[in-house]
Image: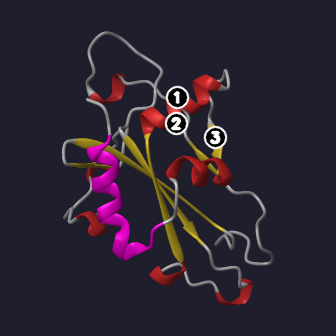
């Protein structure tokens, strides 16, 4: 993911952070799932959810005490679409789809449905909120577009 954005090394590689990387002054969280999991190559998984659990901000130096919230500005949800159990190809970028969603949009959605502390989000909701999937070669442009539309 960092490579798609031209980031040499993501923050979460060298130390624990509340988000995975910064890009254009925004905190980016990356979540991934797939139909064929490395820990279960006997069948195709039906569960398509991603974690969006709010967390405490104390661990990355925020002032004002601990506040439970989503600690990023946008999410990049990654889905490996391969469904061939015997031929899992996690490194083949042709199998990956990416959905980029501003965190404020997720917060509005969870608040609207009365669950601002929601911990998981389904793939269907991610698809609805993101508009459309992009492939690897369109990922940077989509992230830039979402950042340009984040209210500051």
| Residue 145 part of the magenta-drawn span | yes
Segment colored magenta: 134-149
Which sits in the foreground, 18 or 47? Answer: 47
Query: Magenta stretch: dominant SS?
Result: helix
Give me the residue at 55% from left, 46% from top.
129
Q: Residues within 10 Å of mark 3 (few under 14, many from 20)?
A: few
Q: Earlier in the sequence, mark 3 or mark 1?
A: 1
Quadrant for the N terminus, please: bottom left
Left or right position of 5 against 58: left
Circles 1, 2 touching at the beta carbon (< 8 Å): yes
Q: Position of residue 47 (x, y in %)?
A: 75, 57
Asked whether residue 116 is in view, the answer is no
Closer to us: mark 3 or mark 1? 1
Closer to us: mark 2 or mark 3? 2
Q: Which residue is mark 1?
A: 108
| Residue 41 part of the magenta-drawn span | no
Q: CA distance from mark 3 to mark 1?
A: 15 Å
**Residue 43 higher or lower than 5, as above or below:** below
As helix, strand or loop, the secondary structure at mark 1 comes to helix
Give me the residue at 32% from left, 38% from top.
150
Q: Residue furthest bottom?
A: 87
Q: CA distance from mark 1 to mark 2?
A: 5 Å
**Residue 144 higher or lower than 92, as above or below:** above
Q: Position of residue 151 (x, y in %)?
A: 30, 32
């Amino acid at each position: 993911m960092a490579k798609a954005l031209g980031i040499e090394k993501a923050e979460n590689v060298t130390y624990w952070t509340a988000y995975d990387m910064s890009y254009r002054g925004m905190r980016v969280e990356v979540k991934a799932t797939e139909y064929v999991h490395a820990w279960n190559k006997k069948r195709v998984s039906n569960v398509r959810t991603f974690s969006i659990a709010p967390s405490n901000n104390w661990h990355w130096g925020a002032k004002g005490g601990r506040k439970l919230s989503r600690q990023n500005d946008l999410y990049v949800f990654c889905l490996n679409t391969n469904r061939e159990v015997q031929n899992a190809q996690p490194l083949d970028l042709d199998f990956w789809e990416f959905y980029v969603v501003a965190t404020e949009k997720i917060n509005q959605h969870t608040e609207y449905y009365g669950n601002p502390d929601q911990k998981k989000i389904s793939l269907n909701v991610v698809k609805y909120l993101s508009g459309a999937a992009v492939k690897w070669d369109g990922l940077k442009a989509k992230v830039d577009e979402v950042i340009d539309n984040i209210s500051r």
